[in-house]
Structures are given as C-alpha cells and as structure tokens.
Amino acid sequence: MMKRAVGAFGLMVVLGFWLPLAAWAHEFHTSITDAKYNPRNQTYELAVRLYADDVEEALTRRHKATVRLDRSERVNKLLAEYLQTHLAISTVKGTRAAQKFIGAQEEADAIWVYLEIPAGKAPAGQLWVQNALLMEVFDDQTNILNLEVAGKKRSVLCRAGETQQTVSL
C-alpha cells in the first residue's frame, strides 16, 4: 500500500512539473525566414520556418474552417495564398511580386515552407521587406528575416506595428 502511494505521489510530482513546462514550451511566437538572392534565375529563394500549430490556427481563422497541415494540394494552395499576402521583398515599397510556392516540409513541431520571389537584376541600394506572418493570431509574434544579396547579409526584425522595414544593402 505504501509503495503504491509513493508511486502515485511521484507521478503527481513529475506531472506537476512537466505539464506546466509543456504548456509553457510554445509561448514563444517567432518565425525565421532565410532569403537569398539567386543571380542565375534572378529570384529570392526563401525558406520560412513556422510552428505548425500556429500556421494551422492562422489558416483556420482565415478560412473559418479547421485546416490541418498535410501534403494535400488544397493545403499547399492555402499556404501559398497566406504567404503571398503576408510576406514580400521588393525594390519598391508596397509592391509585391507573385510568389512561386515550391513546397513544405514538416520538422518536429515546425514546418519549413519554400518559395521563390522574382527579383530581376541584382538589387542594390535599398529593399522593402514586409513580414506580417502570424501577427493576426499572436500580438507578441516576431518575425526574423535574414537576407543575403551578393555576399552581403542583413537581418530584419518585424513585430506588431512594424511589419514593413527597409533594408540597406
């Protein structure tokens, strides 16, 4: 009887510590985008890392129906539309080129989304960046965009109220 009580108590202690950590584990709302200018095909090649459950929540809210990430053509189309609306790189502020959705890859609790944005000749001077991913879902969302053009690397931090930034090359 005593062993059973100690075992139950031990389980409660472990769960008591573990459950709050599990609930807290995803209170961090950040995306990372790695973008690189490819002079051969004159595009920006982007790899965007997002938490999968956050993307599902954003797509569910946007379409007012439950959306679960899978490899279906429907979900890829929803992801592509979402990225087109919330993420842009351009030489002219406020303009956005049509993106080419390459695909998505799941990784543990995250998803990597790959796309290309037409850029034309190698950009020089300043670029306009918009990154409003998941900001409609989380008011503490931050989005980091790492950009490489002709060997120059720049990083931009976007958050609520600051979703559009200018990058000097």
Image (tube, grey):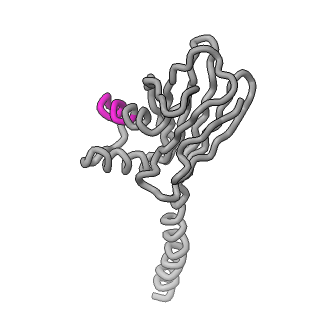
Residue at 51% in and 36% down: 112
Number of numbered discs on residues: 0
Residue 78: x and y in percent read 34, 35
Q: Is residue 104 above or below residue 23?
A: above
Q: Position of residue 150 (x, y in %)?
A: 72, 21
On screen, residue 148 versus residue 20, left or right, reads right
Quadrant of the frame with the C terminus: top right
Task: Residue 45 in the image: state x and y as whole percent.
Answer: 56, 24
Residue nearest the viewer, comparing 96 with 78: 96
Which residue is the extreme one toward the bottom? 2
Direction top: furthest residue = 40
Is 99 drawn above or below residue 10 in the view shown?
above
Q: Is residue 142 magenta?
A: no
Q: Residue at x 52, y 84 (%)?
A: 6
The stretch of residues the image draws in magenta is: 71-79
- Looking at the image, which residue is at 51% across and 83% down? 3
Main SS, magenta region, reads helix
Q: Quadrant of the N terminus?
A: bottom left
Question: Foreground residue, 104 or 5?
Answer: 104
Residue 75: % across, % down: 33, 35
Outermost residue, left side? 65
**Closer-to-camera residue (167/145):** 167
Give the farthest residue toward the front.
Answer: 93
Relative height, residue 59 to residue 153 (above, below):
below
Q: Indicate the quadrant where residue 43 lies.
A: top right
